Image (cartoon, rainbow, N blue to C red):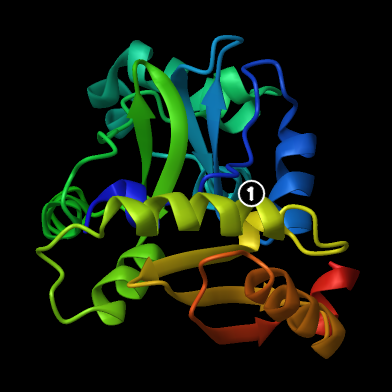
Amino acid sequence: MQAIDVMTRKVITVTPETSVEDIARKLLKHHISAVPVVDDKGAVLGLVSEGDLIRRIVDDKAPRRSWWLELLSGTGARAADYVKTHGRHARDVMTRDVVTIAQDMELGAIARLLEKKRIKRVPVVHEGKLVGIVSRSNLLQGLGSSKKTAAAPASDDRVLREKILEALSEVPGVGVSLVNVIVEDGRARVWGVVDSDFEEKAIRVAVENVEGVREVELQMGRIPAWSYGI
Protein backbone atom coordinates (compact mmCIF):
# COMPACT_ATOMS: atom_id res chain seq x y z
CA MET A 1 0.00 0.00 0.00
CA GLN A 2 1.04 3.57 -0.66
CA ALA A 3 0.27 6.99 0.79
CA ILE A 4 -2.49 7.53 -1.76
CA ASP A 5 -4.36 4.50 -0.37
CA VAL A 6 -4.57 5.70 3.24
CA MET A 7 -4.09 9.47 3.28
CA THR A 8 -6.75 11.88 4.46
CA ARG A 9 -7.70 13.94 1.41
CA LYS A 10 -9.89 16.66 2.91
CA VAL A 11 -7.09 18.45 4.72
CA ILE A 12 -7.91 21.44 6.90
CA THR A 13 -5.42 24.18 5.98
CA VAL A 14 -4.63 27.79 6.82
CA THR A 15 -2.86 30.62 5.01
CA PRO A 16 0.20 32.54 6.23
CA GLU A 17 -2.15 35.38 7.25
CA THR A 18 -4.45 33.24 9.40
CA SER A 19 -4.42 34.48 12.99
CA VAL A 20 -3.24 32.33 15.88
CA GLU A 21 -6.71 32.57 17.41
CA ASP A 22 -8.33 31.25 14.23
CA ILE A 23 -5.84 28.39 14.07
CA ALA A 24 -6.68 27.38 17.64
CA ARG A 25 -10.38 27.45 16.81
CA LYS A 26 -9.83 25.24 13.74
CA LEU A 27 -7.88 22.68 15.76
CA LEU A 28 -10.67 22.50 18.32
CA LYS A 29 -13.53 22.53 15.83
CA HIS A 30 -12.13 19.76 13.63
CA HIS A 31 -10.50 17.76 16.45
CA ILE A 32 -7.08 17.79 14.81
CA SER A 33 -3.63 18.46 16.22
CA ALA A 34 -2.01 20.37 13.35
CA VAL A 35 -2.74 22.30 10.15
CA PRO A 36 -0.56 22.78 7.07
CA VAL A 37 0.06 26.36 5.97
CA VAL A 38 -0.39 26.73 2.21
CA ASP A 39 -0.15 29.52 -0.34
CA ASP A 40 -2.81 30.43 -2.91
CA LYS A 41 -1.50 27.71 -5.26
CA GLY A 42 -1.72 24.94 -2.67
CA ALA A 43 2.02 24.67 -2.01
CA VAL A 44 3.00 23.74 1.55
CA LEU A 45 4.81 26.58 3.32
CA GLY A 46 4.80 25.26 6.85
CA LEU A 47 2.90 23.50 9.61
CA VAL A 48 1.34 24.77 12.83
CA SER A 49 0.75 22.16 15.54
CA GLU A 50 -0.94 22.31 18.91
CA GLY A 51 2.57 22.09 20.35
CA ASP A 52 3.48 25.39 18.68
CA LEU A 53 0.49 27.06 20.31
CA ILE A 54 1.02 25.47 23.72
CA ARG A 55 4.62 26.63 23.64
CA ARG A 56 3.37 30.22 23.59
CA ILE A 57 1.63 29.66 26.91
CA VAL A 58 4.53 27.79 28.49
CA ASP A 59 7.19 30.26 27.34
CA ASP A 60 5.10 33.22 28.43
CA LYS A 61 4.93 31.84 31.98
CA ALA A 62 8.49 30.54 32.12
CA PRO A 63 11.09 32.40 34.19
CA ARG A 64 13.60 34.49 32.30
CA ARG A 65 16.81 32.68 31.40
CA SER A 66 20.06 33.68 33.07
CA TRP A 67 22.12 36.40 31.41
CA TRP A 68 24.89 34.00 30.34
CA LEU A 69 22.42 31.64 28.58
CA GLU A 70 20.95 34.67 26.84
CA LEU A 71 24.44 35.65 25.74
CA LEU A 72 25.32 32.18 24.44
CA SER A 73 22.07 31.78 22.53
CA GLY A 74 22.74 34.90 20.43
CA THR A 75 20.44 37.74 19.48
CA GLY A 76 19.20 35.97 16.34
CA ALA A 77 17.94 32.95 18.29
CA ARG A 78 16.34 35.15 20.92
CA ALA A 79 14.59 37.19 18.26
CA ALA A 80 13.32 34.03 16.58
CA ASP A 81 11.97 32.77 19.91
CA TYR A 82 10.22 36.08 20.45
CA VAL A 83 8.52 35.88 17.07
CA LYS A 84 7.39 32.30 17.80
CA THR A 85 5.90 33.17 21.18
CA HIS A 86 4.45 36.59 20.35
CA GLY A 87 3.59 36.39 16.63
CA ARG A 88 -0.06 36.83 15.71
CA HIS A 89 -0.20 34.91 12.42
CA ALA A 90 0.59 31.48 11.01
CA ARG A 91 3.64 32.84 9.19
CA ASP A 92 5.16 33.76 12.55
CA VAL A 93 4.60 30.56 14.50
CA MET A 94 4.70 27.83 11.84
CA THR A 95 7.44 25.26 11.48
CA ARG A 96 8.98 25.99 8.09
CA ASP A 97 11.19 22.98 7.40
CA VAL A 98 8.29 20.62 6.79
CA VAL A 99 8.94 17.06 5.67
CA THR A 100 6.65 16.03 2.79
CA ILE A 101 6.19 12.81 0.85
CA ALA A 102 4.94 11.72 -2.57
CA GLN A 103 1.63 9.92 -2.90
CA ASP A 104 3.32 6.74 -4.16
CA MET A 105 5.51 6.31 -1.07
CA GLU A 106 5.10 2.87 0.52
CA LEU A 107 3.60 2.62 4.01
CA GLY A 108 6.68 0.95 5.43
CA ALA A 109 8.86 3.80 4.22
CA ILE A 110 6.44 6.36 5.67
CA ALA A 111 6.50 4.60 9.04
CA ARG A 112 10.29 4.67 9.08
CA LEU A 113 10.27 8.36 8.13
CA LEU A 114 7.89 9.29 10.96
CA GLU A 115 10.04 7.35 13.40
CA LYS A 116 13.29 8.85 12.16
CA LYS A 117 12.01 12.44 12.17
CA ARG A 118 9.96 11.90 15.34
CA ILE A 119 6.88 13.44 13.78
CA LYS A 120 3.21 12.44 14.02
CA ARG A 121 2.07 13.28 10.51
CA VAL A 122 3.41 14.16 7.08
CA PRO A 123 1.80 16.14 4.23
CA VAL A 124 1.46 14.42 0.86
CA VAL A 125 2.43 16.53 -2.14
CA HIS A 126 1.81 15.94 -5.85
CA GLU A 127 3.13 18.28 -8.52
CA GLY A 128 3.97 20.85 -5.87
CA LYS A 129 0.51 20.93 -4.30
CA LEU A 130 -0.88 19.50 -1.07
CA VAL A 131 -3.14 16.53 -1.87
CA GLY A 132 -3.44 14.84 1.52
CA ILE A 133 -1.88 14.05 4.85
CA VAL A 134 -0.79 10.78 6.44
CA SER A 135 -0.87 10.47 10.22
CA ARG A 136 0.19 7.66 12.50
CA SER A 137 -3.43 6.53 12.75
CA ASN A 138 -3.70 6.40 8.94
CA LEU A 139 -0.66 4.14 8.89
CA LEU A 140 -2.11 1.83 11.51
CA GLN A 141 -5.35 1.65 9.56
CA GLY A 142 -3.52 0.70 6.40
CA LEU A 143 -1.10 -1.73 8.01
CA GLY A 144 -3.91 -3.37 9.97
CA SER A 145 -6.26 -3.75 7.01
CA SER A 146 -4.18 -6.17 5.01
CA LYS A 147 -1.66 -8.92 5.60
CA LYS A 148 -0.07 -8.07 2.26
CA THR A 149 0.92 -4.48 2.97
CA ALA A 150 3.67 -4.58 0.37
CA ALA A 151 1.19 -5.05 -2.46
CA ALA A 152 -0.59 -2.01 -3.85
CA PRO A 153 -4.39 -2.20 -4.11
CA ALA A 154 -5.93 -2.78 -7.52
CA SER A 155 -6.79 0.32 -9.53
CA ASP A 156 -10.47 -0.54 -9.10
CA ASP A 157 -10.08 -0.28 -5.33
CA ARG A 158 -8.51 3.15 -5.64
CA VAL A 159 -11.33 4.36 -7.88
CA LEU A 160 -13.84 2.89 -5.43
CA ARG A 161 -12.15 4.67 -2.52
CA GLU A 162 -12.50 7.99 -4.36
CA LYS A 163 -16.21 7.34 -4.90
CA ILE A 164 -16.71 6.46 -1.24
CA LEU A 165 -14.91 9.58 -0.03
CA GLU A 166 -17.06 11.67 -2.36
CA ALA A 167 -20.21 10.02 -1.02
CA LEU A 168 -19.12 10.63 2.58
CA SER A 169 -18.57 14.32 1.83
CA GLU A 170 -22.30 14.60 1.17
CA VAL A 171 -23.41 13.03 4.48
CA PRO A 172 -24.90 15.80 6.68
CA GLY A 173 -23.00 16.53 9.87
CA VAL A 174 -20.07 14.23 9.18
CA GLY A 175 -16.63 15.83 9.37
CA VAL A 176 -14.75 14.34 6.42
CA SER A 177 -11.45 15.27 8.06
CA LEU A 178 -12.35 12.86 10.88
CA VAL A 179 -13.19 9.87 8.66
CA ASN A 180 -10.92 7.70 6.58
CA VAL A 181 -11.46 4.71 4.30
CA ILE A 182 -9.34 1.77 3.22
CA VAL A 183 -10.60 -0.36 0.32
CA GLU A 184 -9.34 -3.83 -0.46
CA ASP A 185 -10.98 -6.22 -2.92
CA GLY A 186 -14.16 -4.16 -2.81
CA ARG A 187 -14.32 -4.31 0.99
CA ALA A 188 -14.51 -0.89 2.60
CA ARG A 189 -13.18 -0.36 6.11
CA VAL A 190 -14.17 3.00 7.57
CA TRP A 191 -12.47 4.57 10.59
CA GLY A 192 -13.21 7.81 12.36
CA VAL A 193 -15.24 9.64 14.98
CA VAL A 194 -18.79 10.93 14.84
CA ASP A 195 -21.28 12.62 17.14
CA SER A 196 -24.00 9.98 17.26
CA ASP A 197 -25.35 6.59 16.22
CA PHE A 198 -27.43 8.37 13.56
CA GLU A 199 -24.30 9.71 11.86
CA GLU A 200 -22.68 6.28 12.00
CA LYS A 201 -25.74 4.74 10.34
CA ALA A 202 -25.71 7.50 7.71
CA ILE A 203 -22.07 6.68 6.95
CA ARG A 204 -22.89 3.01 6.55
CA VAL A 205 -25.79 3.79 4.21
CA ALA A 206 -23.66 6.17 2.13
CA VAL A 207 -20.89 3.58 1.70
CA GLU A 208 -23.30 0.72 0.97
CA ASN A 209 -24.93 2.80 -1.75
CA VAL A 210 -21.65 3.20 -3.64
CA GLU A 211 -21.70 0.82 -6.58
CA GLY A 212 -18.98 -1.79 -6.35
CA VAL A 213 -18.77 -1.98 -2.55
CA ARG A 214 -18.99 -5.63 -1.54
CA GLU A 215 -18.74 -5.27 2.22
CA VAL A 216 -18.65 -2.46 4.79
CA GLU A 217 -16.86 -2.54 8.14
CA LEU A 218 -17.19 0.45 10.47
CA GLN A 219 -14.90 1.28 13.35
CA MET A 220 -16.32 4.57 14.55
CA GLY A 221 -15.62 6.29 17.84
CA ARG A 222 -17.57 9.09 19.47
CA ILE A 223 -16.52 12.70 19.96
CA PRO A 224 -16.51 13.36 23.73
CA ALA A 225 -19.33 15.66 24.78
CA TRP A 226 -16.94 17.74 26.90
CA SER A 227 -14.95 18.72 23.79
CA TYR A 228 -17.73 21.04 22.70
CA GLY A 229 -17.30 23.16 25.79
CA ILE A 230 -13.60 23.85 25.32
**Relative to residue 40, is residue 23 depicted above or below?**
below
Name the residue located 25 percent from the left edge and 34 percent from the top edge.
Answer: 102
Image position of 142 (left or right of 221): left
Viewer-proximal residue, 195 or 199? 199
Image position of 189 (left or right of 209): left
Amino acid bearing label 1: Ile
- Callout count: 1
**Relative to residue 173, is residue 195 depicted above or below?**
below
Residue 59 visible, this orientation: no
Toward which corner of the image does residue 87 lie, by quadrant? top right
Name the residue located 15 percent from the left edge and 69 percent from the top edge.
Answer: 149
**Rendering coords of residue 191 (x, y %):** 53, 75
Image quarter of the C terminus: bottom right
Residue 166 visible, this orientation: yes
Name the residue located 11 percent from the left edge and 52 percent from the top edge.
Answer: 109
Residue, disc 1? 57
Image position of 50 (left or right of 153): right
Q: Assign a secondary structure to mark 1.
A: helix
Name the residue located 79 percent from the left edge and 54 percent from the top edge.
Answer: 170
Viewer-proximal residue, 101 or 62? 101
Q: Which residue, as the protein is rendered here, is positioned at the far front?
A: 211
**Rendering coords of residue 82 (x, y %):** 53, 24
Toward which corner of the image does residue 46 lie, by quadrant? top left
**Rendering coords of residue 7 (x, y %):** 41, 52
Residue count near mark 1 (Cα–Cα under 10 Å), binned few <14, some 14–19, many ≥20 = few
